Image (cartoon, rainbow, N blue to C red):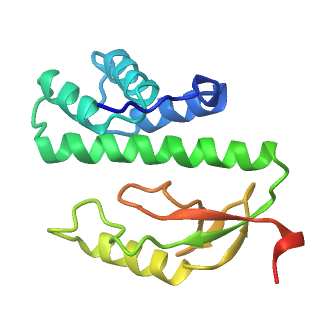
Amino acid sequence: MPTVKFDTSRLTATVLDDLERGIRELPEATPKNFDALYDLSLRAFISGGDLNFLSSALMAMNIEGMTLERAAQISRQLLFRAIEMMDRERQSKLGITKARWMYSNAPCMVDPTDPTPTDLKLDAAHRAANGKLYLVAEGLRVDGKLTWPGREPGCRCSSRSVISELED
C-alpha cells in the first residue's frame, strides 16, 4: 500500500496555533477532550492527512452525539483549514503575493445531502468567487468577509498561485 510522506516542517507555529483555534471553535470540543482532539488531529496530518484515521478516532472518543457523518465533517474541516494555512505560508515563503480562487465544482456545504440556507449562500458566493484574483496575505472578500479557499467549514475550493511575470 503506498504511503504519503508528510513534511512535518509545514506544521509551523502559525499552523499549530490555527489548528488549536479551529478545534476550540468546534461545539464538540470541551476542556476535557481538547488535548485528545488536538493530538489526534496532529497524528492525522503527520500521517499524510488521514481523514479515515481522524474520523475513526473521533468516533472512538465516544463524544456525546458524535455521528460518523459529523466525525467526517470535522476531519475535513480541520484538514482543509490546515492545508489552506500551509499553502498560504508556502506561497509567502516563495514570494508569491497573488492567487486565483478556484471553485472545485463540488458544493461548498457542510452537508450537501441536506443543505441549509447558509450552505446554499456559501456555495453561491464561492462559485461567484471562481477565478478572482486576491492577495495571498489578505484573502478575498467573499460575501462581505475576507477569507481564503478551503478555510470555511464545508469549503472545497483551492487556489492557484499567480506569478505576475507569467500572467498574460
68 vs 95, left or right, is left
Q: Position of residue 137 (x, y in %)?
A: 75, 54
Residue in front for this viewpoint, 132 or 20: 132
Q: Position of residue 78 (x, y in %)?
A: 40, 41
Q: Quarter of the image holding residue 116?
A: bottom left
Q: Position of residue 161 (x, y in %)?
A: 70, 62
Against 34, residue 25 (above or below) is: below
Q: Quarter of the image holding residue 165?
A: bottom right
Quarter of the picture holding the C terminus: bottom right
Q: Residue at x 30, y 29 (%)?
A: 29
44 vs 126, left or right, is left
Q: How many marks?
A: 0
Against 158, residue 21 (above or below) is: above
11 vs 116, left or right, is right
Residue in front for this viewpoint, 167 or 23: 167
Q: Quarter of the image holding residue 107?
A: bottom left
Against 162, residue 63 (above or below) is: above
Quarter of the picture holding the N terminus: top left
Q: Residue at x 52, y 75 (%)?
A: 143
33 vs 68, left or right, is right
Q: Residue at x 65, y 78 (%)?
A: 132
Q: Residue at x 45, y 56 (%)?
A: 152
Q: Position of residue 120 (x, y in %)?
A: 31, 77
Residue in front for this viewpoint, 21 or 113: 113
Pick out the residue farthest to the front: 1
